[in-house]
Image (spheres, rainbow, N blue to C red):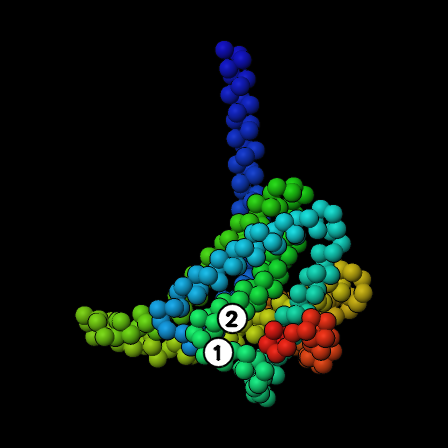
Amino acid sequence: MSGLLALLDDVAAIAKVAAASVDDVAAAAAKAGAKAAGVVIDDAAVTPKYVTGFSAARELPIIWRISLGSVRNKILILLPLLLALETFLPAAITPLLMLGGAYLCFEGAEKVLHAFAPHADATVEADFDAKDPTKLEEEKIAGAIKTDFILSAEIMTIALSVIDSGNLWLQGITLAIVGLAITVGVYGAVALIVKMDDIGLHLASSGRTGVVRAFGNGLVRGMPGLLKLLSTVGTVAMLWVGGNIVLHGLEVTHLWAWPYDTIHHLAESAALAVGAAQGFVTWVVTAFFDAIAGLIIGLILIPVATRIIAPLWRAATGTKGAAAH
C-alpha cells in the first residue's frame, strides 16, 4: 500500500509539473503574441491587396494557399532557424530584429511617401500585367508568401525575445503556438474581410427584413472605407513597431541609447501629468514617438535601398523589375 501511495504521489507531482508547464506555455504565448501585435496588424492589413482584381470564386483559394505558405514559413523554416540561433548564436537575435525593424520602417515610409507623392512603378506594373490569369495568380501568391516571410520572421523573433524560459522545448512549443495562432487569426480575418462585400450583397438581395437588407447595403458601402482604414493602420503599425525595434536595439547594444531613453522618459512624464489611465497614455506617447522615429529611419533608408542596394542586387543576381524590387 505504501508503494502505491508513493506512486500516486509521484504521479500527482508530475501532473503538477505538467500543468505548470502548460500554464507557462499559455502565459508565454499570450505575452509573445501581445508583443508582436503591431506586426500582426500590419500583416492583416497588407494581405487583402493580394486578392484584389480576382473573381470572388478565387479569393478564398488564394488566401488558403497564402496561409499554408505562412505556416511553412513559420514552422518549417523560421522556428528551427531561430531556436538554433538562440542556442548557438544568441547575440545575432538583436541585430536580426533591428534588420527586420529597419525593413518595416522602409516599407512604412515608402507608403507614406507614396500617399503624399503618388507615383507608379512601370517595371512592377509591367511584371504584373500578365495575360494569363493563372500566371498572375501564381505571381501574386508567391509575392504574398515572400512578404509574409518578412513579417513572420519579425513576429517569431519578437515572440522569442520575450519568452523568458531557458527551456528549449518550452520555447519551441510556445513559438509554434504563437505562429499557428497568429496565422489562423490573421488569415481568418483576411478571409472575412475580403468576403464581406459578398456577404453584404447576399444580405442586401436576399434578406427577409428591411433591417437585414439595410445592414447588407451598409456592409457593401462600408468596405472601401474599412480597407482604407486597414491600410492606414497597417502603415502606422509598420512605423511604430519598426521604430521601436530599431531604437530598442540601439539601446540594448549600447550603440546609441539616447533616443530610446528619451522616448521612455517623455512617455512616463506624460503619464504622470495626466494622472489617469497611465498605462494607456504611456503606450500612446511611446507609439507616437516610435512612429516618428520609424518614419525618419525609413525616409533615410529609401534612397539607400532604391539607389544602392537594389542596383547591387540586380547586378549580383541578374534579376530585373519587380523581382529585384
Q: Of 258 and 79, which appears nearest the observer?
A: 79
Q: Which residue is mark 2?
A: 139
Query: At 47% from the left edge and 73% from the top edge, which residue is drawn?
Result: 136
- Against 138, is 70 above or below? above
Label 2: how many residues lie within 10 Å, few (<14), some (14-19) or many (20+)? some
Query: At 38% from the left edge and 68% from the top edge, which residue is drawn?
Result: 58
Query: At 55% from the left edge and 29% from the top edge, which residue is drawn?
Result: 14
Label 1: how many residues lie within 10 Å, few (<14), some (14-19) or many (20+)? few
- Against 148, is 112 above or below? below
Q: Which residue is mark 1?
A: 130
State the image coordinates of residue 302 (x, y, percent, origin top left).
68, 79
In terms of image quadrants, where is residue 319?
bottom right
Q: Secondary structure at mark 2?
A: helix
Which amino acid type is shown beneath numbered disc 1?
Answer: Ala
Q: Is residue 206 left or right of residue 64?
A: left
Q: Secondary structure at mark 1?
A: loop
Is residue 278 in view?
A: no
**Earlier-in-chain disc, 2 versus 1:** 1
State the image coordinates of residue 46 (x, y, percent, origin top left).
52, 71
State the image coordinates of residue 169 (x, y, percent, origin top left).
61, 41
State the image coordinates of residue 82 (x, y, percent, origin top left).
66, 52
Which amino acid type is shown beneath numbered disc 2?
Answer: Glu
In terms of image quadrants, where is residue 109?
bottom right
Q: Residue furthest top?
A: 1
**Circle 2/circle 1 CB separation < 8 Å:** yes
Distance, label 2 to label 1, CA atoms, is 9 Å
- Against 171, is 55 above or below? below
Q: Residue furthest right?
A: 255
Is residue 148 in view?
A: yes
